[in-house]
Image (spheres, rainbow, N blue to C red):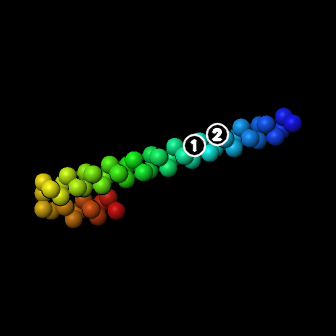
């Protein structure tokens, strides 16, 4: 019984960590896209930034 509980706990932790990682990646991607958009409106040479952001 104890083994199953600890296994579930570890699974829960790893699930939370992977969700946090996905959230971090999506937030940084969104931030980069917003930055690129702002840069495009401010400066015509925005291709370099687009290439850097991916």
Instruction: In this rendered view, identify the residue nearer to me: 54 or 38.
Output: 38
Report the residue that reaches farthest toward the right.
1
User: At 63% across and 44% down in the image, what residue appears?
Assistant: 14
Q: Is residue 1 left or right of residue 26?
A: right
User: At 59% across and 42% down in the image, what residue appears?
Assistant: 16
Residue 48's image quarter? bottom left
Residue 17 drawn at (x, y percent): 57, 43
| Disc 2 secondary structure class | helix
Residue 46's image quarter? bottom left
Residue 37 drawn at (x, y percent): 23, 55
Q: Is residue 48 left or right of residue 26?
A: left
Report the residue that reaches farthest toward the top.
2
Marker disc for residue 29: none
Does the CB distance between marks 2 and 1 fall below 8 Å?
Answer: yes
Residue 40 drawn at (x, y percent): 18, 58
User: At 27% across and 51% down in the image, what residue appears?
Assistant: 34
For disc 1, the neighbor class at 10 Å (few under 14, some 14 to 19, many from 20) is: few
| Disc 1 secondary structure class | helix
Q: Is residue 52 left or right of residue 20?
A: left
User: At 27% across and 62% down in the image, what residue appears?
Assistant: 50
Q: How many numbered badges does the structure rendering display? A: 2
Residue 24 drawn at (x, y percent): 45, 46
Residue 6's image quarter? top right
Q: CA distance from mark 2 to mark 1?
A: 6 Å
For disc 2, the neighbor class at 10 Å (few under 14, some 14 to 19, many from 20) is: few
Residue topped by disc 1: 17
Residue topped by disc 2: 13
């Amino acid at each position: 019984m104890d083994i199953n509980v600890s296994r579930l706990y570890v699974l829960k932790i790893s699930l939370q960590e992977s969700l946090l990682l996905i959230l971090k990646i999506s937030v940084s991607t969104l931030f980069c896209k917003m930055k690129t958009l702002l840069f495009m409106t401010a400066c015509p040479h925005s291709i370099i930034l687009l290439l850097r952001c991916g």
